[in-house]
Amino acid sequence: MDSSGFTPREQEEGQPPPPRVAPDPDNPHWGVPAALGFIILSFVLMGVTQIALLVPYALWRGVPLGGRQLGEFALKDPGAIFVEIISIIPAHLITLGLAWVLVTHAGKYPFFQSFGWEWDARYTFWRSVALAVLLLATGWSIVQIAERFTGPTDNALERVLQSSRAAALATAFAATVTAPLVEEIVFRGILYSALRRLAGAVWAVSIVLLLFALIHVPQYWPSYGVISTILMLSFVLTTIRARTGKLLPCFVIHLVFNSIQAVFIVLNPYLQQFLPPPTTPAPVPAPGLLLNTLLQLFGGS
């Protein structure tokens, strides 16, 4: 193609190139089956990478691969928990690569433009940052109110954070560097777009809101305040996506929401004498769910 925008063949035939139409984020070329299949595949990838890293570590530690030993080892050994958290990173990177193949149709469409990856006048960068801080403060209040009725509750993610300093740092890294991008592309990019085209905005918002919250329930159960906070976050992010057709504000809000908590996780050993630990840990892709799945896979009577 030369500076005129014509390919050599088009110049020879005297035909103009086909017009480049910007993709509509609410009218994607993929459908709901592809979107749901992609979500299932993303969780399968997390399980595969987790097992791929955990099994060699278990063998190195002399843990048998049969019976309940491996499942208990995965749930209780600090080194194993760290390995499982780290395994989320390659799973995320592979997921992003597969998302590129699906969304661009192997290079035929622009990737980020297909999601509306740009700012909206109502949700600029600083407004998105301010909204993330407001959501985090609101979530903290919700947790405090809930604990007035239930008392302090333990959950799977808190046990991960307390298992070792390395696991806490790995969780903070995953929650900040890869989780916001992957989760926004998967849920409010790929899934929401397909549902919006099929069933409309109301159904798309409702289904994405519930699915996003549902995958985090195992790691936060029975911390009802934290689960309510995740529902609130999902509702706000999905509503912004529906109102604006833009995904970039959702990503920035999610990123800031997670990053602030990640900072507290990193600084917690130095601040715990002055401040309570964060009660709404940054949502990463359900390590509690994967740990429990491992226990079921390798458990025995």
Image: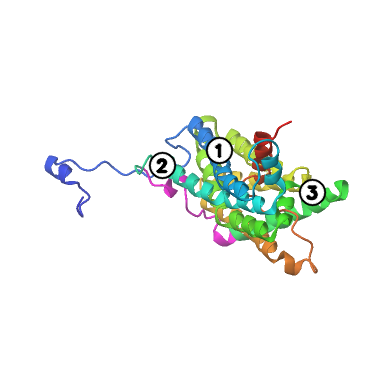
Residue shown at the point (56%, 36%) measured from the top left: 201
Q: Residue furthest front?
A: 62
Tag 2–tag 3 contact (CB < 8 Å): no
Q: Quadrant of residue 286?
A: top right
- Name the residue tied to disc 2: 101
Q: Which residues are magenta?
A: 109-127
Indicate the amino acid at tag 1.
Val
Query: Is 263 placed above or below 161 here?
Result: below
**Alpha-carbon neighbours of circle 2 within 10 Å: few (<14), some, or many (≥20)?**
some
Indicate the amino acid at tag 3.
Asp
Secondary structure under tag 1 reads helix
Q: Is residue 24 magenta?
A: no
Task: Give the CA separation, mark 2 to mark 3.
Answer: 40 Å
Mark sitting on residue 154:
3
Task: Give the CA separation, mark 1 to mark 2.
Answer: 17 Å
Q: Is residue 37 left or right of residue 111?
A: right
Tell me residue 134's x, y (percent).
Answer: 69, 57
Tell me residue 173's x, y (percent).
Answer: 60, 58
Helix, strand or loop: magenta stretch: loop
**Alpha-carbon neighbours of circle 1 within 10 Å: few (<14), some, or many (≥20)?**
some
- Name the residue tied to disc 1: 44
Secondary structure under tag 3 reads loop
Q: Camera-side residue: 34 or 238? A: 34
Counting residues from the N terminus, which is met first, the one under dot 2 or under dot 3? Answer: 2
Secondary structure under tag 2 reads helix
Counting residues from the N terminus, which is met first, the one under dot 1 or under dot 2? Answer: 1
Q: Camera-side residue: 272 or 191? A: 272
Residue 250 in view (yes/no): no
**Alpha-carbon neighbours of circle 3 within 10 Å: few (<14), some, or many (≥20)?**
few
- Closer to viewer: mark 1 or mark 2: 1
Tell me residue 224's x, y (percent).
Answer: 78, 44
